[in-house]
Image (spheres, helix red, strand yellow):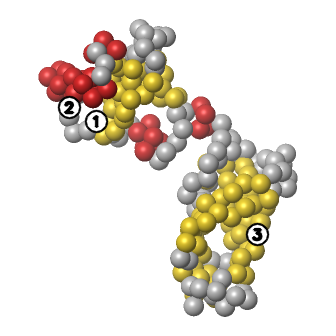
Amino acid sequence: MFYVAARKDTQVELEKGGNNLDFTNSTQRNAFRSSLCTNYGIVDSNLSLFYVAESNATVARIQNGEAYTLTWTASAPDGEVDGFDFSTEDAKKWLQFSANKSSLVADGVESVIISASLLKADKSGIDTTFGSAIDVPVVLPGRNSKLRFLFSSGQASCSMKFDIGGTLYLGSKVSGYRCDNTLTIDIVE
């Protein structure tokens, strides 16, 4: 089971995670609730415990680090957690990456051009109104860094050369955006 525990008086999440307990079993559920209350110094009447099967699609989204808020049956302090709201995540725009080659020689001469497009939240096309910089985390041979993409009309590109071999990897996480794909480029010595 996947669970989330929250305070009812503040409607703040305390913890979440997977657990092998069967929360449909009242003895196991009550023992777990008691442990949570002890750990967080609250009384049971101030604890909301919500759980779903780990196969539930929302669990994968949470484990992938997507932004969410808890939904409640009523306002504090009477409500119980009854689900997850991903509207903040669903409103984020998408970054899509491509490159003009999948490998290059680490000779300091050959270059690769990495392109990025900023797609609308519904992926209906490029957001041509966007013109700003986005720093994208990247794994480079021997170090982690960031590439700054300067967007104009929703598109950007940068050229890179390398002196050492390895693998360039980008597109896993970018703060404030969703990534439509990842990009891996082999740098051969």
Single out the residue that lies furthest toward the top.
78
Judging from the image, what secondary structure is the residue with disc 3 in?
strand
Task: Residue 22: give its label.
Answer: 2
- Disc 1 marks a residue whose amino acid type is Met
Horizontally, residue 114 falls left or right of residue 22, namely right
Judging from the image, what secondary structure is the residue with disc 1 in?
loop
Residue 43, position in %: x, y?
Answer: 28, 15
Which residue is painted at 56% across and 85% down in the image? 165
Q: CA gap, disc 1 to disc 2?
A: 7 Å
Horizontally, residue 173 falls left or right of residue 79, namely right
Q: Mark 1 and 2 residues: CB-CB less than 8 Å, in contact?
A: yes
Q: Which of marks 2 and 3 is in front?
A: 3
- Disc 2 marks a residue whose amino acid type is Asp
Residue at image mark 1: 1
- Disc 3 marks a residue whose amino acid type is Cys
Which residue is painted at 61% across and 52% down in the image? 174
On screen, 75 above or below 33? above
Residue 97, position in %: x, y?
Answer: 67, 62
